[in-house]
Amino acid sequence: MTSLLHINASARGESSQSRAIAKAFIDKLAARRSDLTVDTLDLFETGLPDFGTDAAAAKLAVFTGSEQTPEQAAAWERARQVFDRFAAADIYVLNIPIWNAGVPYIFKQWVDLVTQPGWAFSFDPEVGYTGLLEGKRALTVYTSGVHSPGVPIEFGADFATPFVEDWLRFVGIKDVTEIRFAPTVLTADPQPGFLAAEERARELAGDY
Ligand SMILES: Cc1cc2nc3c(=O)[nH]c(=O)nc-3n(C[C@H](O)[C@H](O)[C@H](O)COP(=O)(O)O)c2cc1C
C-alpha cells in the first residue's frame, strides 16, 4: 500500500482553486494506482490542538533533557498524534494559498505541531539539523490572487514558497514538485491558467 496525505490549507472549501488543482492530481493518481490510500487533512476544519505555553515548554524539555510536567506531557502527546498522522504517509500533496505574503496561519500552526526533535528532525551540535522523514515525496500547489513570480514589489511578495520549500527540506523531504497558479484574481481571464495547472497536475500523477 502507498499512503497519500492531502494537506489542504485553503479556507475556501469547494471554491478553493489550490484544492481543485491538488484534487486533479490525487484523483488521477488514485485512478492509476489501486494500492493508494488517501487521507485528507482539511486544516481549517480539523480542530488542531494549539501549540502554546505547555507545548513549547515540553519541546524545550526534550531539547535540554529535562522532565516534562503532566500538563506539558499531555500537550506533547497531542502534538504527537498530529505528527503520527503526518509521518504515516509516503506522498504529500499540499495546497497552499498565499495569505498576506505568507502561509495561512493554520498551516504554520500545523508545522509547529509536527516539527519536533526526535520526530521530524534530529540535531547535532557538530553537524546541525538532519531531517528524519526520508524516502517521501511531495507535490506543492501554490495560488495567489495578485502576486506572481517576477512582479514588482508593489504587487506583493511571496514568503510562502521559500518557507514551505525550506521546511520540507528541513524535515528531510527532498523530492518536491511544485505547481503554481497565479495570479488568480489580477488577470482578465483566470480560466486558462487554472486549466493549465489542473492539466499539469494530472500529468505529474503519471510520474508517481
Ligand atoms: C486572508 C487572505 C490573504 C491574502 N493575501 C494575499 C497576498 O498576500 N497576496 C496575494 O497575491 N493574494 C492574497 N490573497 C488571495 C489568495 O491568495 C487567492 O485568492 C488564492 O487564489 C486563494 O486560493 P484558494 O482558492 O485555494 O483558497 C489572500 C486571500 C486571503 C483570504
Image: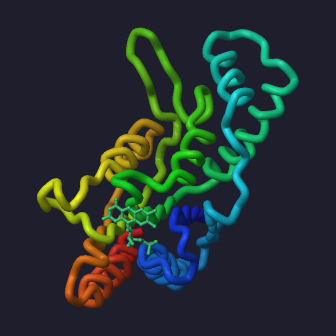
Q: Toward the viewer: 53 or 138?
A: 53
Regarding residue 176, the answer to whether it shows in the image is yes
- Above/below status of 140 relative to 193: above
Residue at the spot 55% in from the left edge and 83% down from the top edge: 14
Q: Position of residue 32 (x, y in %)?
A: 49, 82
Residue at the spot 87% in from the left edge and 23% down from the top edge: 70
- Above/below status of 196 relative to 18: below
Q: Quadrant of the C terminus?
A: bottom left
Q: Position of residue 18 (x, y in %)?
A: 43, 73
Residue at the spot 57% in from the left edge and 53% down from the top edge: 106
Ligand 1 positioned in quadrant = bottom left
Q: Position of residue 11 (x, y in %)?
A: 55, 69
Q: Toward the viewer: 44 or 21?
A: 44
Occupied quadrant, residue 114: top right
- Above/below status of 52 relative to 107: above
Q: Position of residue 62 (x, y in %)?
A: 67, 18
Residue at the spot 50% in from the left edge and 59% down from the top edge: 92
Q: Toward the viewer: 87 or 100?
A: 100
- Above/below status of 200 relative to 132: below
Q: Quadrant of the N terminus?
A: bottom right
Residue most toward the right? 70
- What count of labels does the image hold? 0
Regarding residue 29, the answer to whether it shows in the image is no
What color scheme is it? rainbow
Q: Toward the viewer: 39 or 104?
A: 104
Q: Is residue 104 left or right of residue 177?
A: right
